[in-house]
Image (cartoon, rainbow, N blue to C red):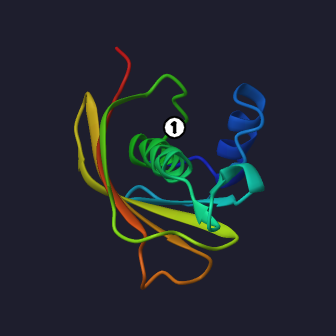
Amino acid sequence: MSIPTTAEINDMVDAQFPGTGRACVEISPTHALAQSVIQPENLRPGGFVSGPTQFGLADAALWYLVFGAIGRIEPMAMTSELSMRYLRPAQGSVLWAKATLEKAGRRNIVGTVHLWTDDNIDNITATAQGTYALPL
């Protein structure tokens, strides 16, 4: 199975969903790595990265994982459910999210996502688990 490249994924996202500020930086059949450079509008008082910003990147990383798991870009794959636990305040200039495949079925892809800031992967700020539904 061939998987799409990060360039192909990012080109599709930029064309169909411009201005997200997110990028897929690594893709495989079992994981995806996404990043977002934090902008002032993504911050809460105290310089904390907002929860919606973290949630959005977790969702994007899981979406990218779907492309690697099924071997093609499928823009109509949709979030079926996503739950998030915030573990500590996120502060930094770059937010990262790594989605790891838990189960790939014919209709659903299940994954776990860990988020962190800058290059501090050992100090995750949030964790999420979710399911993506594939179109008929």
87 shown above or below 110: below
User: On the picture, is 30 further left or further right than 117?
Assistant: left
| Residue at point 51%, 29% (across, down) | 74
| Residue at point 34%, 68% (across, down) | 87
User: On the picture, is 116 further left or further right than 14?
Assistant: left
Q: Quadrant of residue 9?
A: top right
| Residue at point 76%, 56% (across, down) | 40
User: On the picture, is 66 further left or further right than 49?
Assistant: left
106 shown above or below 119: above
Q: Position of residue 107 (x, y in %)?
A: 26, 27
121 shown above or below 85: below
Q: Amino acid at mark 1?
A: Arg
Observer able to see residue 23: no
**Residue linked to disc 1:** 72
Q: Position of residue 38 (x, y in %)?
A: 70, 60
Image quarter (top left, top right, bottom left or bottom right) of the C terminus = top left
Element under label 1? loop
| Residue at point 77%, 33% (across, down) | 18
Q: How many marks?
A: 1
Q: Position of residue 59 (x, y in %)?
A: 46, 44
Which class describes the residues within 10 Å of circle 1: few (<14), some (14-19), or many (20+)?
A: some
Q: Position of residue 93 (x, y in %)?
A: 70, 70
Observer able to see residue 28: yes
